Each structure stands twice: as C-alpha cells, then as structure tokens.
Image (cartoon, grey):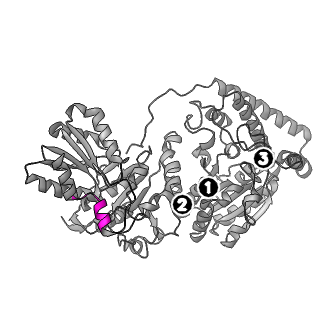
Amino acid sequence: MAEVEFREAIRQAIDEELARDDAVVFFGEDVAAAGGVFAVTPGLMEKHGAERVFDTPISELALAGAAFGSAVAGLRPIVEIMFGDFLPLAMDSLVNQAAKYWYISNERASVPLTVRSVVGGGGRFGAIHSQVPIGWFQGVPGLKLVAPATPGDAKALLKAAIRDDNPVLFFEHKRLYSIKGEVDGDVATLGEAAVVREGSDVTVVSAMRLLHECLTAAEKLAGEDIECEVIDIRTLRPLDVPTVLRSVEKTNRLVVVEEGPRGGWAGELLAAVTEEGLGDLDDAWRITTPDHPIPYSPPLEDAFMPAAESIARAIRER
Amino acid sequence: MTQHFTPRVATESEQALYLELYRRMWLIRRFEDEVQALFLKSLVHGTTHLCSGQEAGCVGVASALTEADRVSCTYRGHGHALALGVDPQALMDELLGRATGIDGGRAGSMNVVALDNGLIGCFGIVGGSIAAATGVGLALKRAGEGAVSVAFFGDGTANHGYFHECLNFAKVFDLPVVFVCENNRYGEFTPYEDVTAGEISDRPATLGIPSITIDGNDMWKVRETATEAVERARRGEGPQFIESMTYRFVGHSRSDPGRYRKPGELDEWRTRDPLLVGRRGLMERHGVEESALDALEQEVDDQVRQVSAAAIEAPFPEPYQATEFKDG
C-alpha cells in the first residue's frame, strides 16, 4: 500500500467521492483555485470542474446555510470551514437546521452534509486559531463528530462521512497534515473505535494528535513494565463505548486524554464507562488541557498541551 | 425549459385562479382565527405567530410557483403552508401536537416541513429561511431544470447577518432564489424604521440584485410581481428581491396585544385588508357575484370548523424512542 501524507489522504477521499457520486459538491473559502490554505485540496477544481468545486465568499453563515439547503434539495455537499474556531458562525445552520431536520420532518428528509474543519493546537496560532471545538457540538443530537488520527483513517472515515445521510462534522488536526501513513480505498464505519496497541495494565483512550503522544507514552511505560492498551476513539459522537468497556474488563484502569478543556468528550466517555462498567474499574480519570485559553508563546503553549512525557508521568504516578 | 412544471394553483381561467387565491386567503384568515382560539384554550401549545393581514403575500407568491419550486419560510408560516396547498387538517393536527400532524407532531407551529407541497421548512430563528433557500437554490441551479427557490422573511431579517451573506452568495453564484421580504412594519414589537438604516429594498440593489417594493396586500400586484421575478430567476438571471409592504392585524405572538402600534395605524390598515381588496377586485375586475363570494366564505368557514373539531379528536403520538440518525 502507498504511504501518503494525511493531507493527501483527505484529498484522495474527496476526489474519489466526487468521481463516484455526481451529487457530491465541495466548496469553501480558498479551497478550489488556491487548493486550500493548508494545501489539502489542490487540483480538485481542475479535475471535477468549477461547478462542483468552488470558492465561496468569507461568509460562514452563508456557507453553512448553503450546505444545509443544498443537502435537503438533492446534493451531498462537503464544505470546509477553514478553522474550527470559526464554527460558531456556522452553528445556527448546523445545530438548528441540519441536526434537527431528519427528526422534525418525521424522518422523511435527511441532511447528507459533511463539514471539514481544521482544528487543534501546537501550531503557535494563538487562542482563536487553535481550539478543538468538539465539545461545543457534543450535546447536539443529530450530529456525528469524526476525528481521525492517521492518514488511513482520515481517508476511510471521510469517505464514510460523505456517504453518511446525516450531518457529519469532520475534524482535521492541523499538526497531523504532514504525517505519513498507508491508505487504501476502503470506507470505514463511523462510530467504531480501534484498539491500536494492546496492553493489560491500563486503557488509554485518545484521538487525533494526542493519540500519537499516548502511543509514545505507552512505549516509554512499556520499558517500566506498565503495559498500556491504547484506543483511538476516532468518532466522538456517537462514542464507541463497548470497545472501551471490553478493554477495561481486562485492564481495570481507564485514562482518557483529550485536547480540550474539561466538559468535553473525555468526561462523557468516563461517565458512560462508569455507568456500564463500574464493577470493572479500579481507577478512571482524564487528562485534558487547562481551563484557560490557548496561549501563543511557544513555552506557554507547550506547557498547556498534554505530551508523551506528561501523559507517561501522570499514568506512572497515579 | 419549464413547460412541464405543474403550477401550484389551478389556472383554467383568470377568474378561477383569483377566486382560488381568494379562497386560500379566506382559509388562512379563518385558520389563524381558529389557531388563536385553540391557543387560548391551551390546545395549541407553546407559542404561535399568526399572519392575519398578510395573506395576499402568501397566496400571490405561491401562485407564481410550480411543483418543482421550493419555499422556505419563517416561524410565521401557517399561511404560506396553506397557500402552497398543505392540507389544513394535517397542519392543524400538527399545531395541536397530534400524531396525524403533517410532521407527526414533532415539528409544531414554528418548524413545519411539508416537502410534498414544496415547503422545505419553516425556520424558527430569524434569517434561517434565507439560509435554507440559498442552499436550495444551489442544488436547483445544479439540477439545471429551471426550478427556483423562494425565501420568505420579515423586515427584521434585513438587519441579520444571513441577509447580507446570503444575498451576496446568491448573487455571485447567480442562484435562482427569489427573496421575499414581507415588511409588516414591526420586528417583534419594534417599528422597523427605528432599527433599520435606509430602505430595505435599496440594499439588494447595491449588490446588483433586481429589487422592487410593492403593495403586499394586493394579491394581483403580488402575483404579477412574483411571476416576473420567478421567471427571471428561471431564465438564469440570478436572485431577485421583492419587498412586500403589509401589516399584521394581530400581535407578534401568543397574546401580544400590540400596544406599540401607533394610534389609528391598525384602523388605517384595516381599510386595506387583503380580503377587502380581494373581494372588491374580484367583483370589479372579474365580475364575480357577491353571492358567490359569500357562498365561498361560508364553505371555508364550515371547513375550518370541521378541521378544528377533528384536530381536537385526533390522537396524540405514543411516547416512543425516536430514531436519532438516519440508518445507512
């Protein structure tokens, strides 16, 4: 299998779905002629035509409204909201229109739209271009939230998101775009976590960039006779609780590592596992980012973000 | 290009068409009266927003549309739904939260979806109808069959972000969207001129969108204007804008008594009631006998009484676990 960058995996998924289904369209700010501010989508407009891949005004309200309206009138839009931090501008159409429509239409009209958005810290982008806005959408029935950690998953999950008949928010961590990995043409199943490292002492669940930090931490701890089972949760709504429950049956310890403040998916996963698997748990806790905005200065941002060393230390000292 | 589209309202003759539009206006008025009565009996829940006084805009625009066209409207959407031909019984049942409602009781007054009648939805937040219609326009343009989308919204929406973003978006992509601003002179309780800089219809004009302000209580004028705007949009001339001047005879919602109205304003507008204008016009322009109009009104009154009685008898939905996601 070919090794490609994460950004290329995303591009391939959009390219293949545009080729497969004429109802798929892709639009956003600077995504077409310029190929995306993170160089994720070059060549798609040239290949599939400016009718189906096009640049929009800097108008997130209109973008999200256009996504919703076109999705309920026969298209299968993919839109890019350039930074996840801009999602509040798109929130009305996504939360009040798209997420509710299948239900209030009495299950007659679905909303097959995908929103791609770049998220995450570590890039020195400061407080308002570095957030992971997943928590803002966690409490919205009708939305699916997807957050891949590898190029292979990025491609397979994005294809699944595009084919899904529900509104899906697809989060791409900006610090993962240049990592390389194998991809194929498969379509993943949304809502399925993956056990990416087996171990017997503690279950470590994470997503996106911090999953890699957790894997590095697991390597360190393995040298100290602490065997971590690492789970890539991959979809944040719905959460794959059964996979985590099966793991804690074995390890009896659970730590969830989230890039974001308390109040996000880590807390929700801990609650769900506690509700159903309390008898299997000797310990359960979370590692999150501190309860303040993301700082700009490199030493401040580095201190803000969980990393392999601090995750390993937290597990070791627990 | 559009010959195969079936009109939303029968057109066997001018007289028959306008009689049908008058019938729908009378139905809307009586329906809204009944909704208010049922609301006061706590049979309609939560809140309601009635469009009494604004009927000509609903039916005039609907009569310019075909079954291929799509409409979005606001929380004040009962009249538009009826104008598009939604079954009054299914609509009333919905407002009473009954299982037989058009959306099974899941949507309610502010959120009605009636896809079989071209109604993409009623949107409960100011500006939402514009957003939805803009997106629908994108899909209809891509389909390339000459269908159009229509957004109904009020004067208050002119000051909303969606208005500016979506009008620009629709224009730069030449989307077949007809924006219909029903200027009823009040955004909730506040006179629009107190909170709106300049004239609303000047704003789309600066974007190069054809824009016109009309008497929205005259169903002939509304139909004629809407027909022209829809045809331009069908021909690929891009978005169109109509400011339809009208007045709501009732409060913004629920039991709002409308104390903010200027003295004499309501009485002045009552003389321009779209039903009066319609009745007079049908007799003068189309030679309709007064007795025929009386009979039509009586028939609709009976229909609304029956609808109301049946809605009260209709079953509530069983409490059940709703499906959260569409399967597959």
Tag 3's secondary structure? loop
Residue to which mark 2 is pinned: A61
Residue A70: give x, y in percent of width and height. Answer: 51, 57
Chain at tag 2: A
Q: Is residue A300 magenta?
A: yes
Q: Which mark is residue B89?
A: none
Tag 1's secondary structure? loop
* Proximity of marks 1 and 2: CB atoms separated by less than 8 Å: yes
Question: Considering the image in quadrants, where does the N terminus of chain B appear?
Answer: bottom right
Question: Considering the image in quadrants, where does the C terminus of chain B appear?
Answer: top left
- Side of B187 relative to B279 (left or right): left
| Magenta residues (range) | A299-307
Residue type highlighted by circle 2: Leu
The correct choice, above or below, for B241 with respect to B206 in the image is above
Residue A262: give x, y in percent of width and height. Answer: 35, 48
Q: Which mark is residue B248?
A: 3
Quarter location, residue B40 = top right
The correct choice, above or below, for A195 with respect to B180 in the image is above
Chain at tag 3: B
Residue type highlighted by circle 1: Gly
Residue to which mark 1 is pinned: B127
Gap in Å between the C-alphas at discs 3 and 1?
A: 19 Å
Write the residue at 68% across / 42% down.
Answer: B78
User: Quick check: can you spot residue A109?
Assistant: no
Quarter location, residue A216 = bottom left
- Side of A27 relative to B119 (left or right): left
User: Quick check: can you spot residue A255?
Assistant: yes
Tag 2's secondary structure? helix
Disc 2 residue crowd, few under 14, some 14–19, many 20+, Cα 10 Å:
many
Residue type highlighted by circle 3: Arg
Residue A69: give x, y in percent of width and height. Answer: 53, 55
Disc 3 residue crowd, few under 14, some 14–19, many 20+, Cα 10 Å:
many
